[in-house]
Image (spheres, grey):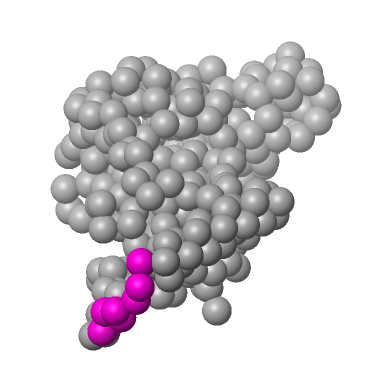
Amino acid sequence: MADDRLNEYIRTCLEKGLPRARVMKNLYEAGWSDSEIEEAFDEFPVTGVRPTPKLPVKKPQLPGKYIAAGIVLVLVVVSVGLILSRNQGKPAFQEHPKPISVADCGASLQCMIASAEKCSPASGKANLTIFTRESLVIDISQKKELCTIVLTNNAGKEGTCEMKAAEMVALLTRWKDGVYNDWGESECSGTLFKPSSNCSLHVSTASLQLKLGDRSEILASGYSKEDTVFWSSDAPAIVSVEQGRGKSTFVRGNAVGNGKVTARDISSNCSSSAKIEVK
């Protein structure tokens, strides 16, 4: 059975309009476990806050001295409860949680980048040549140690990526510069990231050997448009790409080892890769 303090805190927050994700974050930071939070939220379906049943109560006619004694007893119980809560590493909750501020970034990616630096909540709508030529709604929030970015296009497709704050800053900076060839270490999912069912993108070679310092050209075929093809390397210290965008790129061997060069067509989210060995 969920802790009554959790239920009361969640009820108060939801009735004040705080997002469920933000309430969960507050509880995580306060030291409550995943199982405790999940059990407590089971009492509050997504469709709305379950109201507290109101039962008819007859007011007892007690002498004044009993009422005073009762008030003292309640104060003692509450004080003991707060002390036990602190001893358990779980702070007593305020009756009125502070509202959460969400930055309205509009179409400014620079505003998004500033929010991502501290992983603070932000929302905006930007025109990006990625996945679609239409605008994307971008929302930033925090989940435990990771930042979450949610993307929604005009067609209703949605994608979610979770990454560290530094990775999100780097990702948004690349978008600001018009570079969409690398998602970094982010983990993304959703219909927005699902490849087209009829992918036809291919690179001109599946594998390539290079001598240290040499360069070679790799071409792409089966793309929608040249300007929607982006190139990246998973090991740029070993093998780097000279052109990050277009129908072809030159790869260069920088150090002995192995790497992979990938072409991605952002209009269909299709990709094709070549394994590179530098000797």
Quadrant of the image for the C terminus? Answer: top right
Depth order, front residue of 41/271? 41
Magenta stretch, overall SS: loop
On screen, residue 164 versus residue 129, left or right, reads right
* Magenta-span inclusion, residue 163: no
User: Hey, which quadrant is residue 276 in on the image?
Assistant: top right
User: Hey, which quadrant is residue 199 in on the image?
Assistant: bottom left
Depth order, front residue of 38/270? 38
Quadrant of the image for the N terminus? Answer: bottom right
Does 180 sit above or below residue 27?
above
* Image spot of residue 216 (x, y percent): 61, 23
Depth order, front residue of 174/31? 31
Depth order, front residue of 203/159? 159
* Magenta-span inclusion, residue 60: yes
What residue do we see at 71% from left, 21% from top?
Answer: 237
What residue do we see at 22% from left, 46% from top?
Answer: 153
* Image spot of residue 267 (x, y percent): 30, 43
On screen, residue 247 versus residue 209, left or right, reads left
Does 76 sit above or below residue 66?
above
Outermost residue toward the top in this view = 213
What residue do we see at 62% from left, 57% from top?
Answer: 80
On screen, residue 136 versus residue 206, left or right, reads left
Q: What stretch is highlighted in magenta?
A: 57-64
Residue 179 in view here = no
* Image spot of residue 203 (x, y percent): 51, 41
What residue do we see at 25% from left, 52% from top?
Answer: 17
Does 127 sit above or below residue 9?
above
Residue 8 in view here = yes
